[in-house]
Amino acid sequence: MMAERTARHGEMVRQATLEAQSGMGVQSDLPPGEALFKQYCTVCHRITERLVGPPVTEMIEVYADDFNGFKQWVRKPGRKRMDYPAMTGFPQLTDEELKDLGNYIFEQ
């Protein structure tokens, strides 16, 4: 049952991402990390407030001294807290994209 709910959640996130991208488009004139954040993360995350997932400020606290852990989590997340849905992974992101994304997030 949990796997079914997780798959359903992943599909909902995928659909919401597609809708957000088609409705507003991802701007190519943005710095790479910001563009990646807008493309993949803003559906579930805000800088200072909880949405579907925790705010960026909380991510910074958790991964302040573990940039590699952050990158691993984005690629293949698990479930950390029962009060949040499981995050969909982004294994398609390259090391360079993860570096750009992480740099943008940790600059907030």
Image (cartoon, grey):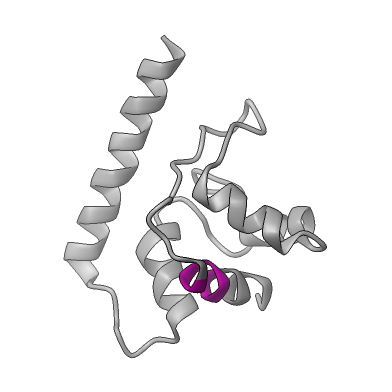
Q: Is residue 100 magenta?
A: yes
Q: Is residue 54 visible?
A: yes
Q: Residue at x 82, y 62 (%)?
A: 65
Q: Residue furthest front?
A: 95
Image quadrant in which the N terminus is located: top left
Q: Which residues are magenta?
A: 96-101
Residue 6 drawn above or below residue 56? above
> How many numbered marks are there?
0
Whether residue 39 sits left or right of residue 66 in the image: it is left
Q: Residue at point 22% right, 54% down?
A: 18
Question: Which residue is depicted at the point 65% across and 75% down?
Answer: 108
Q: Is residue 49 visible?
A: no
Q: Is residue 49 above or below residue 77?
A: below
Magenta span includes 65: no
3 relative position to 103: left or right:
left
Outermost residue, right direction? 65
Q: With respect to residue 45, does 33 lie above or below?
A: below
Front residue (pair 76, 37):
76
Which residue occupies 44% across, 65% down? Answer: 94
Dividing the picture into quarters, in which one does residue 66 lie? bottom right
